[in-house]
Every structure is written in structure tokens, then in C-alpha cells.
Image: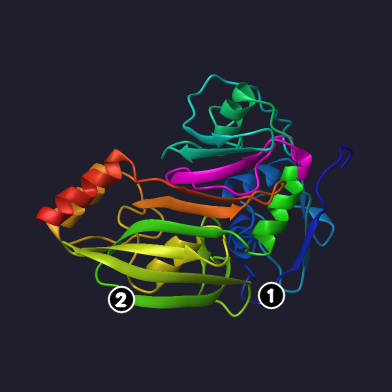
Amino acid sequence: MSESAPTPTVLTLSADDAGERIDRVLARRCPEFSRSALQRWIEQGRVEQSGEVVSRKTKAVNGAEILIHPAPPEPMSAEPQAIPLHVLFEDDHLIILDKPAGLVVHPAPGHPDGTLVNALLHHAEVRGGFDPLRPGIVHRLDKDTSGVMVVAKTPRAHERLVEMFQQHSLERAYLAIAVGRPPQSIRYETLHGRHPANRKKFTSRSDRGRRAVTDLESIELLHGSTLVRCRLETGRTHQIRVHLAEHGHPVLGDPLYGKSIGDPELRRAATELGRQALHAAVLSFAHPITGEAMRFETEPPEDFQKALRSLRRG
């Protein structure tokens, strides 16, 4: 390939792959790439089997070596946008804010603007990190998760906050409405990695991955569900959603890890909420520059509260 591109991916086909269309084989064998991206790269001549460029209808051959040349990402930049922010605290080093549900944290394919980063760049100068699309970002919340976040305004604060997250030296607690009746208290300690069949999901049902620890406490019984507090020791992507779902009590309204709900009142609450019932309620840490103890706690937003009220009446 003539242009600068990511490192090629190499894999060897097996007897189980033989005879199947190459695009289908790659969609199964390469969950780190989307099916549409793989098909586009095939059409662009970026995929080879035993040195020969393939088409989508090429049949896989047992033992053949596949070489995938991913296309370089399209250049993107984050521009300031006047999007309202709910700032809880701000000084020369940090911004603490209460992120609303529905707001994506940083630009990415499919969400080039209208993100928290765009709002932050309009609000103040935020710096730190090597990715121009994520200036100041040291952790993130899923688009449809609300709650407390910290953002660095300087490279020094960013570096120190990243260390604190890596060392798990912050207190983070979430509130969630879990379907069913989880234990009164339990510690989920698992491995955590990409789901083998769905690249958008993660799983704890694996013998490979990174350590993930969630401490759950049930704090209120609701109709067909339970209000729980989840304290994070680690902060893997979708960690709480995966731990609850794979232990039989998915977060209410979770579109990715949830399951079909038979109870009409519970189903109605999930439908009206329209997102996962998950809120980052507590963030506590030592100020990365001054060392001052800092603690921020927010109540869930109105849509979450409405779901709680309806399930308390059930």
C-alpha cells in the first residue's frame, strides 16, 4: 500500500474455514474489525490470500495465509462547539462535570462532532494526552450513561490522573437498576475482554483478558428489579454492564447486554427510560496537583428518577 497505514493483520486459515466465502470467514475470525470495514477493504484490494488479492466471493483455503492491510483512518479534528455543560468544579488544572445521558465523550467515526470534547474546547483550554480527538480525557462514560467525570486542563494534571486511574486510587461508585434480585452484596472478580462473536461487546466469560473487579451492594428492592450500588476497583469498558448481565441481572434498559423482559410494568419502565439505567454517582480522589481530598456526588437525572418512581409503585 502506498499510503501510510496501520500494521497489517496476518492470520492462517484452518480446515473449519475452508470453502467458505472469505468475507464471512474474516467477519468471524477478526472481531476487532467491523464487517463493513472488512468488505470495504476487500473491495479496495487490501486483503490477500496466499499473496493473491481476493474478492468477496473468494473461497477460503485451508492453511492459506491471509494478509489484511487496514485503511488508514480518515483525518478528523475536534472543533469547539457551544454545547451546555454542567460543571461541578473547575480550577486551573481540572474540570469536574456531570455528563448527561446521550452525550458522546469524544469524536469517533459515526460521531464526528456534538461530543463532550467539542463542548469542553468551547468552554476552556483542555490539554493532555497524545490523541487530538481526546484532549484532557482520562476516562469516559458510555454515551447513555450519566454522571460525574473529571477532565484534565493541563498535561501535568492529565499525566497524574492517568496514573491514578491505572493505580485504581480513585473511588468510583455507580447507581444502577438491575433486573431481578442480585445478592445483597457480592464481589465480581473476573477477566474481561472483547466478545469473540460481537465486536461491540465485551465478556467476562473468558480465560483471557484483563482483571475486572466490581463490588455490588443491593440498596432498594423495586418491582421486578433492584437499585444497586456498584463500586469499581477497575474500570474496564462496559464493566458493570457485563458483570451484571453475565451474572443474570442486566442493567434495566441496556440495549446491548439486556434480555427480553416479560413483566409488563418492568418492560414499560425500560421503554420509557430508553437507555441503560446506569449513573456514575460518586467520584472521589486526591487533587493531582495540590493533593487536596476531593469528592463529588450527584443524583441520577430525571429519566432515571422517573423509572425509580414507577418501579416503587409497582
**Label 2 sits on residue:** 184
Q: Amino acid at mark 1?
A: Ser
Which amino acid does the dot numbered 2 rest on? Answer: Gln
Magenta segment includes 84? no
The dot on residue 123 is none
Q: Position of residue 192 (x, y in %)?
A: 57, 70
State the CA–CA distance, disc 1 to disc 2: 47 Å
Q: Secondary structure under badge 1?
A: loop
| Residue matched to label 1 | 14
Q: What residue is rendered at 42% in x and 44% in y?
A: 144
Q: What is the span of residues highlighted in magenta in the rendered image?
A: 128-156
**Residue at the location (22% across, 48% down)?**
307
Q: Quadrant of the C terminus?
A: bottom left
Q: Position of residue 49 (x, y in %)?
A: 77, 59
Image quadrant assignment for residue 284: bottom right
Q: Which residue shows up at 18% across the image and 64% down it?
A: 224
Q: Is residue 138 magenta?
A: yes
Q: Is residue 76 above or below residue 219?
A: above
Residue 45 in view: no
When asked about the image quadrant of residue 65, the answer is: bottom right
Quarter of the image that includes the N terminus: top right
In the rendered image, residue 123, in percent from the top left (x then y), is placed at 59, 24
**What secondary structure is marked by label 2?**
loop
Q: Nearer the viewer, residue 280 or 110?
A: 280
Most extreme residue toward the left is: 313
